[in-house]
Amino acid sequence: MTAKTVLIADDDSAIRTVLTQALSRAGYSVRSTATATALWRWVAEGQGDAVLTDVVLPDENAFDVIPRIKKLRPNLPVIVMSAKNTIMTAITAAERGAYDYLPKPFDLSTLVQTVGRALEQAAKPAGSPRPQQHNDNLPIVGRSAAMQEIYRIIARLTQTDLTALIIGESGTGKELVAQALHDYGRRRKGAFVAVNMAAIPRELIESELFGHEKGSFTGAHARMAGRFEQAEGGTLFLDEIGDMPLEAQTRLLRVLQQGEYTSVGGTTPIKTNVRIIAATHRDLRQLINQGQFREDLFFRLNVVPLRLPPLRERVEDIPDLVRHLLTRAESEGLPRKELSSAAIDRMMQHRWPGNVRELENLIKRLMAIESDDEISAASVERELSAAPAPAEAQPVTSADGLPEFMENHLSRLFAGFGASLRRRGCMSGFWAM
Ligand SMILES: Nc1ncnc2c1ncn2[C@@H]1O[C@H](COP(=O)(O)OP(=O)(O)OP(=O)(O)O)[C@@H](O)[C@H]1O
Ligand SMILES: [Mg+2]
């Protein structure tokens, strides 16, 4: 069998060289170009078994070429590489019909694997791309490597109806991600219904989800539609799923298995067509070990896990987030303010146990109380030290070993010193204690 050919378009010759070497070593033949024009010519001539392209090419944007490629050769997989990394790049790539999206920089082994998978899939019929216009109002902000990975998963998930489980500390953006999965997904014309398990009295959860018949319990004066019914054709977001009582878990599991349910007090099965997205800040594995969460339900929900990183693990996102949150608060009526770069530096040294929500609250507070147009580092310092230290969102548990305990303890300790403290200085200080 002759080697499969990969067509590469990237205006950076160093990248072309590296990619050509890696793919040749993996047994592919490769043709590479700097322009969209040459790429399009090759595709139109019937060359190539897969395409690997940068987004911004000197003569044309790859996002404009991909729909033409998919129209002419629907089974030719296109992989998009991009260094302009917003959630929209990932989503647009998926919408235009790209097979996958690789945020730069990426591992060459990831690339080779992706190309391999793309070629395997090429025999299957392609889904139809749905061109769409997007403005620059990004729903989710941050360009850290950790968030890039999240965008990549979101983009892939928007093309499916798979169940997703979003895990992350409080305030990391779980609901925001659930909403984006809906808004950019196949069901965006349907309803997005959010239910918070922790906010509903335990004995009412089943009736809330599945509805109830008149007279099915004391106080059930009339038939009531449940959230499943409201979300029909759309998305049901089950927030704080770790707080769901066991009986309701059993019922939910049955719905997921059978695609139908009965209301509380009802006997007729009702068919359901709802996409489930669940979220929790709790450790479901631990709850399973304690007998508080059904393992079989966990496996049903955890089809695609999305783990949102805490803000302290992506402090490089803080400047973007601050800009975004300032604009948002301004549109909600708070007076326009800027932050000095020293103020942002100070924010980057904080540990943010309440994550983006804590950052958002701080920004709103500063906008409301500061009289200067520019918020200074001193003001940030004052607010951060005045606020009572909230409990760590993920407390050290007995399940953690000593190394984890030490790491958590030390990072909390050093967080107080800020980024200016050098590693050696830290350690000598520590040993001298
Ligand atoms: N990456 C992000 N970009 C922009 N805004 C964000 C981002 N992450 C979180 N936010 C904002 O921070 C706030 C908290 O986000 P969200 O409610 O989605 O978090 P959560 O994980 O559901 O928190 P909780 O566990 O407290 O319910 C919201 O106002 C949200 O818009
Ligand atoms: Mg939430």
Image (tube, rainbow, N blue to C red):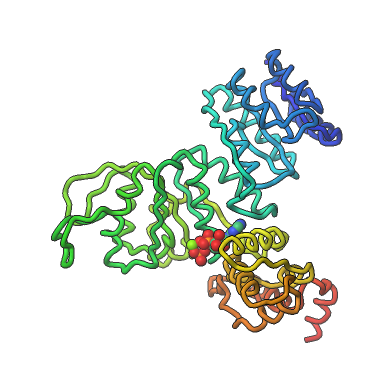
Residue pictured at 72% horizontal, 40% vertical:
82
x and y, in percent, of residue 315 in the image = 70, 63
Q: Residue at x 72, y 25 (%)?
A: 6
In the depicted structure, whether residue 105 falls above or below residue 366:
above
For this view, does 379 lie left or right of residue 263? right
Q: In this rendered view, identify the residue nearer to me: 41 or 50.
A: 41
Where residue 334 sits: x, y (%)?
A: 60, 68
| Image height of 372 relative to 205, above or below | below
Q: Is residue 44 above or below residue 130?
A: above
What residue appears at the point 16 percent right and 62 percent down from the top-left corner? 221
| Direction from residue 288 to residue 207 in the image, left or right | left
Q: Is residue 121 left or right of residue 142?
A: left
Decide which of 201, 422 is in the foreground and name it: 201
Q: Report the side of 398 relative to 368 (left or right).
A: left
Where is residue 396 shown, x and y percent of the image?
57, 74
User: Based on the displayed image, in which of its 4 quarters is residue 83 positioned?
Assistant: top right
Report whether residue 288 is seen: no
Residue farthest along the left direction in this orientation = 215
> Residue 132: where, in percent of width, then height?
57, 35
Is any atom of residue 13 visible in this view?
Answer: yes
Q: Residue at x 52, y 28 (%)?
A: 127
Q: Nearer the viewer, residue 43 or 165?
A: 43
Check the picture and name the quadrant holding the N terminus: top right
